[in-house]
Image (cartoon, rainbow, N blue to C red):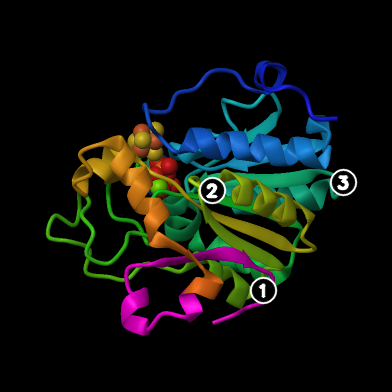
Amino acid sequence: MPRDLQTYLRDEIKSTAFCPGCGNGILMGSVLRAIDALGLDMQKVLFVSGIGCSAWIPSPHFKADTLHTLHGRPVAFATGAKLANPALEVIVVSGDGDLSSIGGNHLIHAARRGIKLTIICSNNFIYGMTGGQVASTTPLGDFSATTPAGNPYPPFDLVRLVMAAGASFAARWPVTRPVHLIEAIKKAIRARGVGFVDALTPCPTQYGRRNKFRELVDQYDSLEKMCIDREEARKLSEEERKNKIVVGDFETFCP
Ligand SMILES: Cc1ncc(C[n+]2csc(CCOP(=O)(O)OP(=O)(O)O)c2C)c(N)n1
Ligand code: SF4
Ligand SMILES: [Mg+2]
């Protein structure tokens, strides 16, 4: 039976270290709500994260077992933990840079091996913690500390990447759609092999201010408007789809 919000937050969360307006708070709440809705016993869950602001989502926030590991290596640690104790529900929560830039190889090989892991990527399109450097997820043309003239490279489509590598389930939702996000996290936890969620989230401090979002609300608004459902995307031409991000649950690879 779900607990009321007050009790829930008191029981499961310590205190927060995120900047005001950071989307990681919504993602953190979504992870907890998904776990609560599934009725998982927190004592049987291990959270693993790497290094970065998003890696703080489970540790130090959650009153649970956490492994706060090396930058880029949470999936490697999670794989080891799952092999050592297959009864553990192992959930990785970390940043886009952590999981797909420095840690990209661990991500695709975990998907290929089909090991039962949930991997939730807080994708804020940038290296937030270290001063806003470009990541493998930074959109083409966007500004970062290391791309003052605009990013010359296209970003990874993380859903396609992990599905092509063999993930059982992958989804992409922005934190502006928490109901969908929570449902996707539940499905990822229930997936046979790797269940992956690309959670799009604003980083006002590093990404937002460099990309000319004067008001916090504009960044949330712009993210929400950029996201379109698959059905909607199919109706658009390639040109019209250019600056859009297709969101949804992807149980099978669908180009
Ligand atoms: C081996 C290694 N290289 C680089 C770093 C520095 N470093 C720490 S966090 C980070 C980037 C984090 O970005 P991301 O994973 O996207 O997390 P965010 O802060 O955006 O949530 C980097 C480059 C490190 N700690 N270890
Ligand atoms: S730097 Fe960005 S990602 Fe990190 S806590 Fe601040 S707003 Fe969030
Ligand atoms: Mg990031």
User: Does the segment drawn in magenta span residue 137?
Assistant: no
The percent coordinates of residue 215 (x first, y second) are 25, 36
Q: Amino acid at mark 2?
A: Arg
Q: Using the image, determine if residue 231 lies above or below residue 133.
A: below
For the N terminus, give its image quadrant. top right
- Above or below, 68 relative to 162: above
Question: Hey, which quadrant is residue 35 in on the image?
Answer: top right
Inspect the image, locate mark 3, and give the three-letter code of the amino acid beneath it.
Ala
Q: How many marks?
A: 3
- Placement of the C terminus among the 4 image quadrants: bottom right
Q: Which residue is mark 3?
A: 87
Give the residue pinned by disc 1: 166
Q: Residue at x 23, y 59 (%)?
A: 142
The residues bearing labels 1 and 3 have C-alpha atoms spaced at a distance of 22 Å
Q: Is residue 213 left or right of residue 247?
A: left
Using the image, tell me which numbered label, if any, was put on residue 128: none
> Spatial distance from mark 3 to mark 2, Cα to Cα?
31 Å
Can you give x and y, in whole percent of width and height, for residue 148 in the image?
14, 55
Specify few, some or many for label 1: CA neighbours under 10 Å numbering under 14, 14-19, or 20 or more.
many
**Helix, strand, or loop for circle 2?**
loop
Q: Nearer the viewer, mark 3 or mark 2?
A: 2
Tell me: is circle 1 under 8 Å from ligand 1: no
Name the disc covering residue 177, or none. Answer: 2
Q: Residue at the location (59% across, 56% down)?
A: 197
- What distance separates the C-alpha of mark 2 from that of mark 1? 26 Å
Q: Using the image, determine if residue 251 lies above or below residue 190.
A: below
The stretch of residues the image draws in magenta is 233-255
Q: Amino acid at mark 1?
A: Gly
Pointer 2 or 1: first along the chain: 1
Mark whose residue sits in front, 2 or 1: 2
